[in-house]
Amino acid sequence: MTLGRNAVGYLTESMHGAGSPQAQRIQLQRLARLDEKKAMAKRLAGVEEPDEPTRDD
């Protein structure tokens, strides 16, 4: 079904039955822990976070 001249609109990824590709992307982003990885990359690169501005109200 995913090969041949009549299968132009089908991608192999979308035919395996594990849910929609967008739902898979969302779940992978949840499991990836990107914030932790970004913080680690900044620490390894020596990037310092700017100090939080203080509000004098």
Image (tube, rainbow, N blue to C red):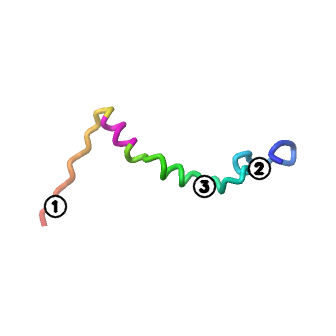
Q: Secondary structure at mark 2?
A: loop
- Front-most of residues 2 and 5: 2
Asked whether 42 falls inside the magenta stretch, the response is yes
Residue 45's place in the image compared with 3, above or below, is: above
Q: Are marks 3 and 2 in contact (CB under 8 Å)?
A: no
Q: CA gap, disc 1 to disc 2?
A: 55 Å
Q: Which residue does the numbered mark 1 point to in the structure image?
A: 55
The disc, 1 or 3, on the residue closer to the chain's N-terminal end is 3
- Residue sitting at x 74%, y 45%: 12
Which of the marked residues, 1 or 2, is nearer the chain's N terminus?
A: 2
Q: Nearer the viewer, mark 1 or mark 3?
A: 3
Label 3 to label 2, Cα distance in Å? Answer: 15 Å
Q: Residue at x 23, y 46 (%)?
A: 50
Amino acid on which the number 1 mark rests in the picture: Arg
Location of mark 2 (residue): 10
Q: Residue furthest left?
A: 56
Q: Label 3 sits on what residue type?
A: Gln
In this image, 37 relative to 31: left or right? left
Figure quadrant of residue 55:
bottom left
* SS of the residue under disc 1: loop
**Which badge, 3 or 2, is on the more N-terminal residue?**
2
Establish if 42 lies above or below 51. Answer: above
Q: Residue at x 12, y 63 (%)?
A: 56
Q: Nearer the viewer, residue 31 or 46?
A: 31
Q: Which residue is mark 3?
A: 22
Structural crowding at the residue carrying mark 3, measured as other residues with C-alpha within 10 Å and reported as few (<14), some (14–19) or many (≥20)? few
From the top left corner, tell me how far across and down residue 1 is, in percent.
Answer: 83, 48
Instruction: Read off the magenta span.
Output: 37-43
Name of the residue lying farthest toward the bottom = 57
Q: Position of residue 24 (x, y in %)?
A: 59, 52
Q: Residue furthest right?
A: 5
